């Protein structure tokens, strides 16, 4: 899958070189990726900003100065200032007792 896009782009560049459509194809390609980035990044930034203003985070390996909550249940799983929890592969993080 990783090699498909570059090959497709190379084919289009070769096929459309003389027609002046190449610049349009590049613009469409770039617009697609920028739009995708905005659609994904903006909601994430808004969510993290709201969490930090409320005094907690749901991110696993960031913001040690804030308490960490489970992103699904909202339960506190790490107190503010405690060492960051390293999630084990295939398993969830440990809960506070």
Image (spheres, rainbow, N blue to C red):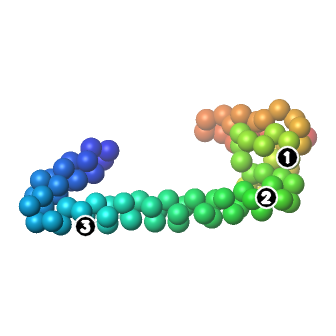
Secondary structure of the residue carrying numbered label 2: helix
Marks 1 and 2 close (CB-CB < 8 Å)? yes
Q: Which residue is identified by label 1?
A: 66
Q: Which residue is identified by label 3?
A: 24
Marks 1 and 2, how far apart in space? 9 Å
Tell whether 88 sits left or right of 66: left
**Number of residue marks:** 3
Of mark 3 and mark 2, the one earlier in the sequence is 3
Residue 16, position as x, y percentages in the image: 13, 61
Tell whether 45 sits left or right of 29: right
Q: Nearer the viewer, residue 71 or 51?
A: 51
Q: Which residue is identified by label 2?
A: 51
The image quadrant where one finds the C terminus is: top right
Secondary structure of the residue carrying numbered label 3: helix
Residue 75 in sight: no
Please name the residue shown 53% across and 66% down the image.
39
Mark 3 crowd level (few <14, some 14–19, many ≥20, 10 Å Cα): few
Secondary structure of the residue carrying numbered label 1: loop
Mark 1 crowd level (few <14, some 14–19, many ≥20, 10 Å Cα): some
Please name the residue shown 46% across and 65% down the image.
35
Marks 1 and 3, how far apart in space? 47 Å
Marks 1 and 3 close (CB-CB < 8 Å)? no
Of mark 1 and mark 3, the one earlier in the sequence is 3
């Amino acid at each position: 899958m990783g090699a498909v896009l570059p090959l497709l782009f190379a084919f289009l560049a070769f096929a459309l070189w003389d027609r002046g459509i190449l610049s349009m194809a590049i613009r469409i390609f770039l617009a697609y990726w920028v739009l995708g980035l905005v659609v994904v990044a903006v909601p994430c930034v808004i969510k993290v900003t709201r969490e930090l203003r409320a005094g907690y985070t749901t991110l696993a390996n960031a913001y040690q100065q804030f308490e960490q909550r489970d992103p699904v249940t909202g339960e506190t799983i790490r107190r503010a200032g405690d060492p960051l929890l390293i999630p084990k592969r295939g398993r969830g993080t440990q809960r506070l007792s």
